[in-house]
Amino acid sequence: EDKVVQSPLSLVVHEGDTVTLNCSYEVTNFRSLLWYKQEKKAPTFLFMLTSSGIEKKSGRLSSILDKKELSSILNITATQTGDSAIYLCAVKKSGAYKYIFGTGTRLKVLA
Amino acid sequence: EAGVAQSPRYKIIEKRQSVAFWCNPISGHATLYWYQQILGQGPKLLIQFQNNGVVDDSQLPKDRFSAERLKGVDSTLKIQPAKLEDSAVYLCASSLQGEVDEQYFGPGTRLTVT
């Protein structure tokens, strides 16, 4: 059975800290891995990672896929209170364009 | 570009009642997804359409849930009769087509079953 597992489930840090969120997967027909940020409403897209192993960066956020370890990390440096959200990891399968989501990591950044 | 539209945004019903949700995807997006997100969990795929055909409905509780996408554009998801455990946010998402496209989510419908 396909599975996407995120850790930790929740995390509380102070502004300025750096955090690393983890996502591991056991999925057949892997195509890509996506990270989303979910605040009070719908998930918003952050990154898409493929087996090329290229790191993606956007401001203070960065992410990379380790194809050998079947995992990905999302790094957030110099965290701000606006980073408080649930971060979702999803794996996209080939063929039917199906996405399988993890349970998410709830991040709270304290001022 | 307009995003994915959903309505209603909130709905409260009693158990055993029926409810319907509506989704209008981004124009030109061939693939449409309905997800159920229970509090504290990630989104779970209920049904996936490619144009007006069903690609995957393996996790749709077909005894009470139904969905359709007539004309390959907007879609409705219905629950009849609702149970307490159906309380969740129902998210609709769409993607253009092809394996390189990410999906875009609508604002969701928060359903509370009492």
Image (tube, coloured by chain):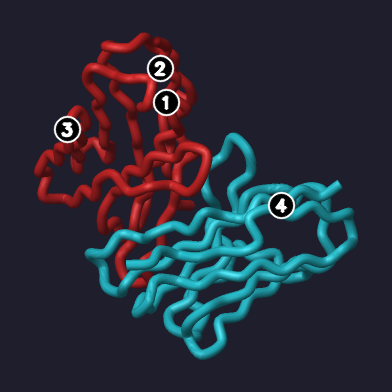
The chain drawn in red is: A
Left or right, residue B74 beside residue A92: right
Dot 1 falls on which chain?
A: A
Q: Say yes or no: labels 3 and 1 on the same chain.
A: yes
Residue placed under numbered mark 3 in the picture: A59
Which residue sits at x=50%, y=65%? B5
Q: How many marks?
A: 4
From the top left corner, tell me how far across and down residue B87 is, in percent.
73, 48
The numbered mark at residue A84 is 1
The picture places residue A111, in percent across and down from the top left corner, at: 39, 10
| Real-space CA distance between mark 2 and mark 3, rounded to the nearest whole angstrom | 17 Å
Mark 4–mark 3 Cα distance, whole angstroms, equals: 35 Å
Query: Circle 4 is placed at which residue position?
Result: B111
Report the chain holding disc 4. B
Asked if marks 2 and 4 fall on the same chain, the answer is no
- Spatial CA span between label 3 and label 1: 16 Å
Which residue: 14% across, 37% down?
A: A57
Mark 4 lies on a secondary structure that is strand
Is there a contact, CB below 8 Å, between mark 4 and mark 3?
no
Disc on the earlier residue, 2 or 1? 1
Q: Quadrant of the image for the N terminus of chain B?
A: bottom left
Q: Which chain is cyan?
A: B
Which comes before the other along the chain, label 2 or label 3? 3
| Cα separation between marks 4 and 1 | 24 Å
Q: Badge 3 local density, few (<14 within 10 Å), some, or many (20+)?
A: few
Q: Are marks 2 and 1 in contact (CB under 8 Å)?
A: yes
- Give, as a three-letter code, the residue at label 1: Ser
Amino acid under disc 3: Gly
Callout 1: SS: loop
The percent position of residue B110, horizontal first and vertical second, equals 66, 50
User: Could you say which is closer to the camera, residue B31 or residue B59?
Assistant: B31
